[in-house]
Image: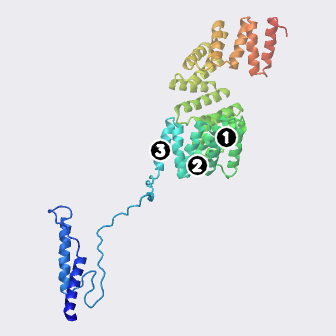
Amino acid sequence: MRKLFLPLALLLAVSLTACVSAPPVVPEGAPGEPGAEAAKEAVAGEVAAEGKAKAGESVAGQAPAGGEATPPEAVIEGVAAPVPEEGAVPAPAAPVVPAAPPPPDLAALTAEANKNFAEGYPNTALEKILVVVAKDPAYPGAKLLQAKIYYVLGDSADGLPLLAELIPKGEGGPEALDTYVRWNERLGKTGEAVAFLEKLASEFPQPPDDLLGSLGWCYYSLGDYPKAISTWEKIGDPAQSLKYALILSRLHYVNGDLTGAERWAKEAQNNTDPLLARRGKLALAEVFLARGRASSSRTILEEIVAEAPEDYETLNALGLLDIRQEKQKEAKEAFLKASEANPARPEAFNNLGLVQRAGGEHKSAEENYRKALFVDGNFAPALKNLAVLYEKYMGRFQDAIPLYEKYLTLRPADEEVQKWLKAANRQAGGGQ
């Protein structure tokens, strides 16, 4: 009996096992319908598994006859993102970092800053050049432009120290030196500029020409003419010394050194600027006149007038030479032309008044003296000449007195005019 039931029990166990492990039956859908193809593939897989089992092959998840069970191969076609539980806080998203901007083009920025500065936009230029200096403090020309902008803006607190930093390094050349000197002059600190430049010059066996030029200019501005002369005359490059030739000629002339005055007057004629070259000729004519060579002086003056018929300085000088040679008519004509060429200058009006007073044209002389004073109320020669005209030629003592008094505030050492003022006061009834 036990032998009869054993096969039946085994058959029943196999049948039950098949029923439990079989997947649920999924109704087949229409072709293309969601789940239809998946259902077909599931059924086909079960059939294949049964076939392998019958053939004695290993089926995934079941032990083959006489061996251990093998785990099924994991085939992962996709992983779904985990769904956070209700109330869970998701991790913050990573911040988006923008791409770094390209580095500034220093050459282009410097060119733009120079253009803005030249067009009269110093603040815009400063914004750009500060970017350049921040990126490269040694970028060529950047700090010099920065200093020039500060000069225009009047920022001496930043500008002067910057120039003092650049100049000893030789950066900026003559332009940096000129800006430094002009700036100190404007602030009334020429003495400080002299101290700085003298210290700098002492560091060289032979100071550079541009440094000598700037230092000489400071001496000249302070009225120290001997030092200005000696400093400028140390300049080795003729092109550099030519800048100061006219001033040197005048300084030597004033000091009575006609040889030095003549030398530098001739040098000044080498200027490429026609106006400066004419001024060199004019200085030479003045030297010749001082030497008693009036005809040589006239020849030069007439050459200049032929080149430039409306040259104010030369016309005025020619009129003075005519007075000296007692050519009143020619002098009057020269001064008249000069006053027409430049009515903003007082000298020709004053000199024309002198010629007219000498010719008895007192009203015309008064008119031209007044024109000179209209241009410059402190022009001492016209104050004196008009006072003399009123006191000595027209008997207008009350009108002469204030003119004499104002003249003496400008020229207090003129003893002759002091006497005339006393005489005018007596004549006017004012006593001593």
User: 50 or 360: which is nearer to us?
Assistant: 50
The residue beneath circle 2 is 171
The residue beneath circle 3 is 111
Residue 119 percent across, percent down from the top left: 49, 35
Residue 323 percent across, percent down from the top left: 64, 17
- Name the secondary structure under disc 3: helix
Q: Amino acid at mark 1?
A: Gly
The residue beneath circle 1 is 216
Quadrant assignment for the C terminus: top right
Q: Amino acid at mark 2?
A: Glu
Question: Which of the two marks, 1 or 2, is nearer to us in this view?
Answer: 2
For label 3, count other residues whose C-alpha is less than 10 Å away and answer few (under 14), some (14-19) or many (20+): some
Q: Earlier in the sequence, mark 3 or mark 2?
A: 3
Question: Which of the two marks, 3 or 2, is nearer to us in this view?
Answer: 3
User: 10 or 79: which is nearer to us?
Assistant: 10
Residue 208 percent across, percent down from the top left: 63, 48
What is the distance, in whole Å, between disc 3 and disc 2 at their CAs?
Answer: 18 Å
- Name the secondary structure under disc 1: helix
Q: Amino acid at mark 3?
A: Ala
Q: Earlier in the sequence, mark 1 or mark 3?
A: 3
Location of residue 264 by image quarter: top right
Whether residue 253 is visible here, answered yes or no, is: yes
Please indicate whether residue 309 sits to the left or right of residue 396 in the image: left
In the current view of this chain or complex, which residue is farthest to the front?
Answer: 1
Disc tally is 3
Please indicate whether residue 419 sits to the left or right of residue 140 in the image: right
What is the distance, in whole Å, between disc 1 and disc 3 at their CAs?
Answer: 34 Å
Location of residue 220 by image quarter: top right
